[in-house]
Image (cartoon, coloured by chain):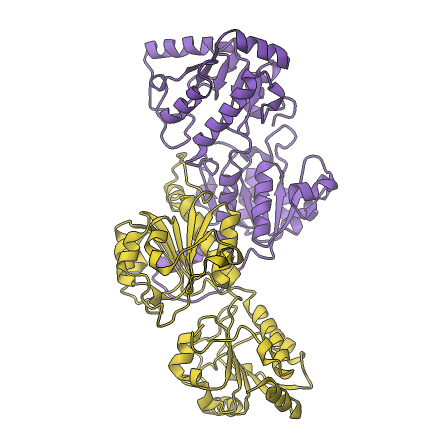
Chain colours: A yellow, B purple
Amino acid sequence: MTANQGSDTSRSEKVVAMIASPLEPDLAARIAAAFPDRVDLIYRPDLMPPARYAADHNGDPAWTPSPAQQAAWRELLGRSEILFDFPVRASGNPLAFSPRLRWLQATSAGVGPKVHQVGLHQSEAIVTTASGIHAQPLAEFVFAALLFHVKRLAHVQAEQQAHHWQRFSAGELRGQTMAIIGPGRIGQEIARIARCFGMTVWAMARRHDPGRVEALGVDRLFPRDDLKAMLAGADCLALCLPHTPETEGLIDRDHLAALKPGAVLVNVARGAVIDEAALIEALRAGQIGMAALDVFATEPLPADSPLWDLPNVWICPHSASTADSENGKLADLFIRNLGHYLAGELDLMSPVLDKQRLY
Amino acid sequence: MTANQGSDTSRSEKVVAMIASPLEPDLAARIAAAFPDRVDLIYRPDLMPPARYAADHNGDPAWTPSPAQQAAWRELLGRSEILFDFPVRASGNPLAFSPRLRWLQATSAGVGPKVHQVGLHQSEAIVTTASGIHAQPLAEFVFAALLFHVKRLAHVQAEQQAHHWQRFSAGELRGQTMAIIGPGRIGQEIARIARCFGMTVWAMARRHDPGRVEALGVDRLFPRDDLKAMLAGADCLALCLPHTPETEGLIDRDHLAALKPGAVLVNVARGAVIDEAALIEALRAGQIGMAALDVFATEPLPADSPLWDLPNVWICPHSASTADSENGKLADLFIRNLGHYLAGELDLMSPVLDKQRLY
């Protein structure tokens, strides 16, 4: 598909776009109002499970559609050229139920593995991701964890519970070193705030290019061969790399042993990038002082996982990126990409999933 | 005392300076090494209670000096022209036991009320404070609290304790409005970090001067008459004003009622600046969503205070400013001021307590 072809097609008739996961009515209305003469927007909340919280893209699993609702949902998907999100209650390759699909706007950044799994990477369909949307909420989660740890607030909470008043001393982020693996949009936002707190920022990227230090807003870039040296000097480690075949199990037992003792680890990437069993051992041994985990090898985290009860762990149910403002940002992103799509400016759509790199 | 007189005096003989509260030996050695030919530094940790934590300026109350230790301590104080801190185990006016006192370097910023109480404000002795030393740790405490609240981490902790996995949505600091009362060094550091998080920053200063907006790093300054308007638009309120007769009870019941419902309040100033009974009511009613309190009307917080058990309160035992790095910074500050004192550059000593304003 070239830009001209896209343009020609879009001008011939209305493009059918479908909101395929829960979205607030006012946001659907905003999307519908953006290009009313060019787009036939399908928005049928009555055929979708209700959202349980802001930016719930899956909807309530307890909701059960009637056979008629299921049939209507499938029929609408079959007409759609554009999908806003992977359709709820329809697993597998979206092309199986939306054969006309030419563009899917995902609501998550890390959709590479899913696209690969369902086979969508082999199609011509464009997949735009939500990369960037979650940078600020995830960075805020990272600093919530780092500050909670360095200011010894678990101690403060325990003392309060015991009604015990004893002055104490805490550490400071200022002067600490933050190591970031995966200095993409999320990692760069973490780096920016870390510097604001007076931290030194190190990072390791997939492609090592020392010339990008300034562009990424970090103090030093480490090649992958020097990963252990970076870990040894870091007070905190933020994982924000994509999950790809290349990054699976990237952080292993030896890496955790190389960390500065007592370091804080925050994982806002994917559970698969770290050896979870080794992580649990390192947490029990105190080699890792605290881990704030938003992602896990298996989600939901299994009931028998020792992580639930480790006193130096935060279990966040893959929600650190989920903000009350998220759907508004997603609607804005979709409208911007829709404008480019309709104008045939496919090269201006962003962020487009690279189906080889899978992020 | 003029600059020249100070200079003449200091050149005639060694100046006697005394470390009057617990300090690490290496820091005392650093001070002693700064001007060895000009200063006779008294450092007798054997006559002081041991520190219980880094930057403990009071020492262990369980420690009891022998009569001989007490006598030695008093004799050394009597010889001192310079005191590093108010002497431990000696209440009242430092001039009563150090009649030669010409300069006292405090280890806290908010020493105005104490100086006034013991009558030191009526003497010629210079009092330098630790104002500025605590800006970074206090700002970090403020953001620890704000992020904990906005990211709903009490909910995350409760869910983890219940081994319950349910995705959820949280708020963001970005886009919120921070109101600061007292944009001094601490308030300005809070403002700087707030802007880094994408917050709008409002402030109220003692003297209203809209021209200082840029210098203070805030978006808007409110005159005192508009305090309620500022509170009504604020998602969080940081109290960092000094405790003076003018500020005592400044935040009353009506002000708390004027706050945006659910706002976060952080008090790193002094307990006396707010009506604590009204604060408790506002917390119980949910008018204040969360309060992170480092200071209280009475300290230690009395055992029967309802604050201990309110679920939306953090009780920090006046330690949010206490950082492991504090004594090192205090030693640096003392050495810098000592250099100016010895050179007769009394006008360069800082920060000097204004004995009228009391901060």
Residue sitting at the far top: B12
> Residue at image x 58%, y 83%?
A43
Task: State whether residue B76 is above or below residue B240.
Answer: above
Percent x, y for residue B319? 45, 36
B281 vs B113, nearest the viewer: B113
Name the one closer to the observer, B225 or B354: B354
Given residues A261 and B78, the one toward you in this image is A261
Q: Quadrant of residue A63?
A: bottom left
Q: Which residue is rendered at x = 65% and y = 92% of the image? A: A13
Q: Quadrant of the C terminus of chain A?
A: bottom left
Residue B245 appears anywhere in the view: yes
x, y percent for residue A333: 59, 72
- Total number of numbered discs in the rendering: 0
Quadrant position of the N terminus of chain A in the picture: bottom right
A305 with respect to A342 (left or right): left
B60 relative to A54, above or below: above
Name the side, left or right, on which B221 lies relative to A202: right
Residue A90 can be seen, yes or no: no
Residue B90 percent location from the top left of the image: 44, 16
Instruction: Reply above or below: B281 against A293.
Output: above
Residue A358: x and y, percent?
43, 74
Judging depth in this view, the residue of A102 and A223 nearest the camera is A223
